[in-house]
Image (spheres, rainbow, N blue to C red):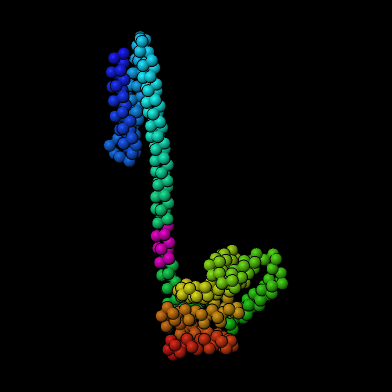
Amino acid sequence: MKKILFLFACCLSLNANAVAQLSDESSALRKPKLSETDLFARVEGIEQNMVALQKQIYSEPKTSGGSSNVAVSAQFDELYQLLKTIRGDIEQLQFEYSQLNDKFIKFSSDIEYRFNELNQRKDQTKINAGEADKKLDSIDEQLTEQNVFKGSDQKALEKKAKQEQSLNKIKNSTKDDQGEILYKKAYAAIKEKDADKALKSFQEFIDNNPNHVRVSEAQFWIGEINFQAEKYNQAAIRYLKSYQQNPNSDKAPDSLVKLGESLGRLHKVKQACFTFAKFKKEFPNASTFLKKRANEQITSLGCK
């Protein structure tokens, strides 16, 4: 019996130290001192020692102190269950750590992807801005290119007649015209003062209906949205496209005036003055309002 108690005391001492160590080492996943393999090896070693010691107790011949053996065995069972609980806690910590690590890797990858995408967009924006700037600097060439029809050109007049016929047809029957539906959706957003929705809808209309009769009008309205947002470079490009795509549309005079005004805001005085001169030459019968606005800009810019 003395031998058993001595062995039990040794085991208690061993396991008390082990349990205390395990409590301190519950952060082993964070500390570099012990790896997960080492930690589990220690737990398994303690379990094996306890099982061996318990077997030795049961193998001792029964004496009058048999009840003491039962008590010792019960305490062994409690310690063994505690050890199993600690092992389970370690496994749970390992699982949670693994999940957090996976989430962190995914988060890092997502951040890196978005960062690279943002840099690409910035680079593309710089390229587009540079191209747009070159185009606006050569506005005299842009407004006299072959794809811009002159008001006195017979082909242009024929084109305008066909466009008007198409427009009348659209007005009379729009149920089957998905392009017209998209255009009206975008225009409704303008009336609702929802600039973001209007911008997206007009661009969707242009992308899906590049040859639609209202494309030049959509370009004009995108220009208006950018102008109101003080994005004069983008606005100027849209006004230019609006005029180029249909110089005989109802919005053509407005497009030239707003193009000139945008160029003025960009401090491209020479180009702005050329645009206003183009307007006065091409549209002598424009509305009084547009003429007044153009003259005010001409005076303000000091155009000769």
Q: Position of residue 255 (x, y in %)?
A: 54, 79
Considering depth in this image, is 179 or 52 the residue closer to the camera? 52
Figure quadrant of the N terminus: top left
Considering depth in this image, is 235 or 106 the residue closer to the camera? 106
Query: Does residue 67 sit above or below 234 in this rendering?
Result: above
Tally the marks: 0
Asked if residue 300 can be seen in this view, the reply is: yes
Q: Position of residue 69 (x, y in %)?
A: 36, 16
Q: Is residue 57 magenta?
A: no
Q: Quadrant of residue 135?
A: bottom left
Q: Position of residue 199 (x, y in %)?
A: 54, 68
Direction right: furthest residue:
172
Residue sitting at x 45%, y 85%: 273
Q: Is residue 123 magenta?
A: yes
Residue sitting at x 34%, y 36%: 26
| Magenta stretch: dominant secondary structure | helix
Residue sitting at x 40%, y 31%: 85
Q: Quadrant of residue 24?
A: top left
Query: Does residue 148 sit above or below 62 in this rendering?
Result: below
Magenta span: 117-126
